[in-house]
Image (tube, helix red, strand yellow):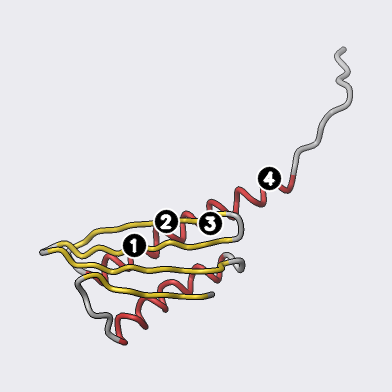
Amino acid sequence: MNLQVSGHHLEITPALRDYVTAKLERITRHFDNVIDVNVILSVEKLKQKAEVTVHLAGKDVYVETVDEDLYAAVDALADKLERQVQKYKQKLQDHHRGSKIIDHIVVE
């Protein structure tokens, strides 16, 4: 997994980078085919915004959260991202499973 963390109007401290990395490790636990992860953290007056784009095999997932606290925004971001990755993984599994087709139906 290639992780890139950048800041917009914000300096990314090692503690903040470690926190984001730890939160996004949950994604690789659910889905092994994570190719690239881009995280942008930004500050606008009282709003702290966290955005992530995850490049999976076959799909790009984008999530954005806004909160008063940057750490809370990263927590919410990780939760949203985890739900979307699980939904995509479930879609892939359902698609490949297929359904049985009944050749004939007997009605009595």
Image quadrant in which you'd find residue 76: bottom left
Residue that appears at 51% across and 75% down: 2
The residues bearing labels 1 and 3 have C-alpha atoms spaced at a distance of 18 Å
Q: Give the mark nearest the N terminus, 4 or 3.
A: 3
Q: Give the mark nearest the N terminus, 1 or 4.
A: 1
Label 3 SS: helix
Residues at circles 1 and 4 in contact by the CB criterion of under 8 Å? no
Q: Nearer the viewer, residue 100 or 64?
A: 64
Where residue 95 is drawn, which disc sits there?
A: 4
Q: In this view, does 43 lie above or below 90?
A: below
The residues bearing labels 1 and 4 have C-alpha atoms spaced at a distance of 29 Å
Q: Name the residue under label 2.
A: 62
Residue type at the position of mark 3: Gln
The residues bearing labels 4 and 3 have C-alpha atoms spaced at a distance of 14 Å
Residue type at the position of mark 2: Tyr
In the rendering, at what x and y percent does residue 83 appear?
A: 46, 56
The residues bearing labels 2 and 4 have C-alpha atoms spaced at a distance of 22 Å
In the rendering, at what x and y percent does residue 32 appear?
A: 61, 68
Mark 2 vs mark 4: in front: 2
Q: Give the mark nearest the N terminus, 1 or 3.
A: 1
The residues bearing labels 2 and 3 have C-alpha atoms spaced at a distance of 14 Å
Mark 1 vs mark 4: in front: 1
Label 4 SS: helix
Residue type at the position of mark 1: Glu
Mark 3 closeness class: few <14, some 14–19, many ≥20 residues within 10 Å: some
Residue that appears at 47% across and 54% down: 84
Q: Mark 3 points at which residue?
A: 86
Q: Give the mark nearest the N terminus, 2 or 3.
A: 2
Q: Name the residue under label 1.
A: 51
Mark 1 vs mark 3: in front: 1
Image quadrant in which you'd find residue 14: bottom left
